[in-house]
Image: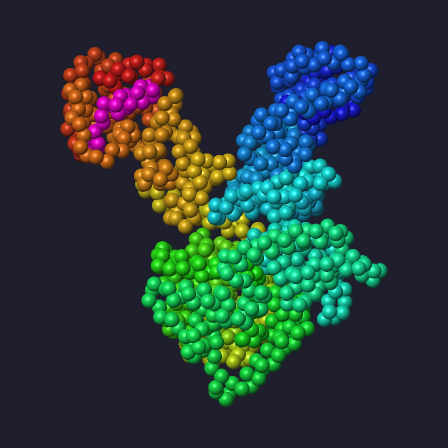
Amino acid sequence: MWVNPEEVLLANALWVTERANPYFILQRRKGHGGDGGGGGLAGLLVGTLDVVLDSSARVAPYRILYQAPDSLVYWTIACGCSRKEITEHWEWLEQNLLQTLSIFENENDINTFVRGKIQGIIAEYNKINGIKEDDDTEKFKEAIVKFHKLFGMPEEEKLVNYYSCSYWKGKVPRQGWVYLSINHLCFYSFLMGREAKLVIRWVDITQLEKNATLLFPDMIKVSTRSSEHFFSVFLNINETFKLMEQLANIAMRQLLDNEGFEQDRSLPKLKKKSPKKVSALKRDLDARAKSERYRALFRLPKDEKLDGHTDCTLWTPFNKMHILGQMFVSTNYICFTSKEENLCSLIIPLREVTIVEKADSSSVLPSPLSISTKNRMTFLFANLKDRDFLVQRISDFLQQTTSKIYLEKNISGSCMSSDDEVFTRSNSIISASTHKSLSSESEGERQFNLNGNGIPTATQALMTMYRRRSPEEFNPKLAKEFLKEQAWKIHFAEYGQGVCMYRTEKTRDLVLKGIPESMRGELWLLFSGAINEMATHPGYYEDLVERSMGKYNLATEEIERDLHRSLPEHPAFQNEMGIAALRRVLTAYAFRNPNIGYCQAMNIVTSVLLLYAKEEEAFWLLVALCERMLPDYYNTRVVGALVDQGVFEELARDYVPQLYDCMQDLGVISTISLSWFLTLFLSVMPFESAVVVVDCFFCEGIKVIFQLALAVLDANVDKLLNCKDDGEAMTVLGRYLDSVTNKDSTLPPIPHLHSLLSDDVEPYPEVDIFRLIRSSYEKFGSIRADLIEQMRFKQRLKVIQTLEDTTKRNVVRTIVTETSFTIDELEELYALFKAEHLTSCYWGGNSNAIDRHDPSLPYLEQYRIDFEQFKGMFALLFPWACGTHSDVLAARLFRLLDENGDLLINFREFVSGLSAACHGDLTEKLKLLYKMHVLPDPSPEQEEPDSAFEATQYFFEDITPECTHVVGLDSRNKQGVDDGFVTVSLKTDKVGKKSSQENRNYLRMWSQENKSKAKNSKELPRLNQGQFIELCKTMYNMFSEDPNEQDLYHATAA
């Protein structure tokens, strides 16, 4: 191919000149092609150097150089993989350029002309073939070509990056290059004539870890189900390992919920100063990783993309200091976090911003930037490196935000002016529209009012209706509650209120002391980030409620079943009002996110959210929980909870080692962690204590749950060590959690389910919830969020691959009695079937990948393949696949196996067809072949066959399908038969010239002996003449490669 002219320093080093003229030289790389010249040891050394030094000559061993007369400078203008390709370029140059160049007198003119001509050819080629200019560098494009050629990958397989490293093959390291693509990890090495290749699919990886040994401080271990691979001597092991983790994560997402990878095309163009070897895909993945960390840090919506970040200082009026930290800017938010952890963080939604202005610089305050918000707060940033550019970016985003707000105003009729109004205005647009949707409920629910003031239920937290403050004994507690409220009000006055407040260590300390009942809903919304999604989606919840009303599916059935099991001891859920609100929230979420739908434990969590938040707020809190704060917890296989169970086991091993072995022997950790994590302790702790845990969880995230679980184990070490079985251990933990109390609670005591069921054993000493939480921070507060994420990745690989193995075992166990395949064969077939499905997902297929993989379906139907995939597997596995008729036969069999006509077949259908073709007896094989040629005609009436057809029909009615081994279904695998086919007695040369009538008599005799089988055969639909001819063609094609094909064909026709 033609390449952009590039200067070459040493034209003859490691290259052999094959042709030359005054302007151009055609060269071949030593050790490639040729008639022995340049081969031998020199060729091996050159080949090794090309691999180790990542030379493009490994892929393109031919090149054409341009050199102006009397010049020492050479330019590469073309390269080629084969002699044929480079010769075509050479001949074009001789015919089109040589004579023209002799006209020029000036050397510079010749150089300009040749380079311009070559660039013009490349541009024209790109235009004709629709090749768009991309961000990838020339060096990386060479690597892509090399990757596709070395490993036989199609164009659809995108290379992300490649790194120099050593791969340990046995005890010998092989120096080469590891190529990381979206779906594969590949390695290539060529040393002294010996080639080493390795290709691993990311979906097959069960473990990925970075090891350090005495000999090799940096080593990456990649494990699959069948083998382990070690890579070492990386130039940048951290970057390589992070990219591997990211690609493995994408593969796990694909296995989990069929979420494929789509490249982000909106990335900014590559700067000239950027590293030469960075691909557009690598930049995309880096940007995704940064955005993910950014969203997790500030609890932002899932679609928020980080635009950039910069070092700066923030003036904090509460302590009158300039705090050093980083400013993050994204499409809809400006955020800040201090360098010193927990010192101060800030979230400013652009929808709240009114003014962004550059203040005057001074020696004390260089490059300051002032940002004012609607609730009259002003934030002063300084020490900004590129302030003008930053202001321009913020202005651009502000303009987009303003246009979005105007659009929403036009749609909804009005727009709330601030987030505070979400909490204070009971007659807001949200409340009014909720009232409207409630009154139109088709379930016959009556409208519920409170104190006759006409406010619908949806605008009130359920707890406000059931707060009893009359008894005298509650006064001290009410006084304490009042003091808490005052402390928070003082905090708001000092640090700001609402989404733009300064979040400091003092904020966290106040949360750990317990949020006041009246402020709980407001602060949960704030800390979880749900307030942002609610503010940017006005009317969304009401619309969902309206659309989901009266719809029924599996999720709504499960919701109805669990409604009366949700906090049944609380008065709010002992009547239809609370139950109806819970039904609406759960059903609306099931319709928003069908991948999750509804999962047990969601009802318990949602019922608590409804107690403290309005109905719409509870919905957005549930969204934040299911989609961001507890990822994958509530899907059909509770993968997220299983992952965190594994993380908890690791943490228990590190933090309570004396207990770990005992807990593993008893199998308690797996039992407790699921019930504790899925319901955030709400199902195992008294209600008034558990809500304090939820307070901390919304503020600090999942680390609180891990800390608390470890604190509970630590508090019961001695008792657990003396337990004999898991039942006894569960009783110990259950009684301990039942005794956790909240003495500050102003709520009437709600009897807890565990305590109601417990026997009359002496009660456990009371444990104060605030003391327990404080203890968990003192002993296990060192657990960091980034450490949890690392551990989650490791466990996610393990959990998802274990679930895949379980699915495979269940499928095989279900289907093994229906087929003649062994368990091992079925497992191999399942792996092949799944691999075919996944390959088509990332390399494209005719049908939608989501249609073909539905994790909610029964095991046997989860993976399905379309015809294009089936055709490939038919050619690979079916004994009838040979010759030109193979595709037609595959199409017939596919249509036969596709029972529901959705143009997809599942594993059971696939195996039933393959089993009949490979292991079926003669009857089954002929019946299958016969059915394949009967078009699905629903009408039972058929025309009477003509006389010629009657004879063939007679043949097929009387003949038992035992004769069908003539077709030779599995003959390729059998030996001992002369021509490779079992021909029964239809071969005339072996039965001694019997007449057609004698054959007919034999067939009649066999028919009588196998009456039952013949009866089944007669029940099949009849073939018409065209179908019969097609059947004969198929059978003839099957014999076409047999030496005795004519005898076989005549025997069949007889």
Q: Position of residue 628 (x, y in %)?
A: 54, 57
Give the side of residue 765 with respect to residue 822, left or right: right
Q: Position of residue 715 (x, y in %)?
A: 57, 71
Find residue 451 and report its image quarter.
bottom left
Give the side of residue 168 with respect to residue 737, left or right: right
Instruction: Tell whether position 584 is magenta.
Output: no
Region of the chain picked out in magenta, as a range: 1018-1039
Q: Position of residue 340 (x, y in %)?
A: 72, 62
Find residue 987 and report its image quarter.
top left
Give the side of residue 165 with respect to residue 690, left or right: right
In the picture as drawn, the residue positioned furthest to the bottom comes out as 472
Location of the N terminus by quadrant is: top right
Q: Is residue 1005 above or below residue 522?
A: above
Q: Is residue 272 above or below residue 370?
A: above
Q: Position of residue 396 (x, y in %)?
A: 66, 51
Q: How many marks?
A: 0
Please tell me which residue is depicted at 38% across the width and 48% down the height of the picture.
Answer: 858
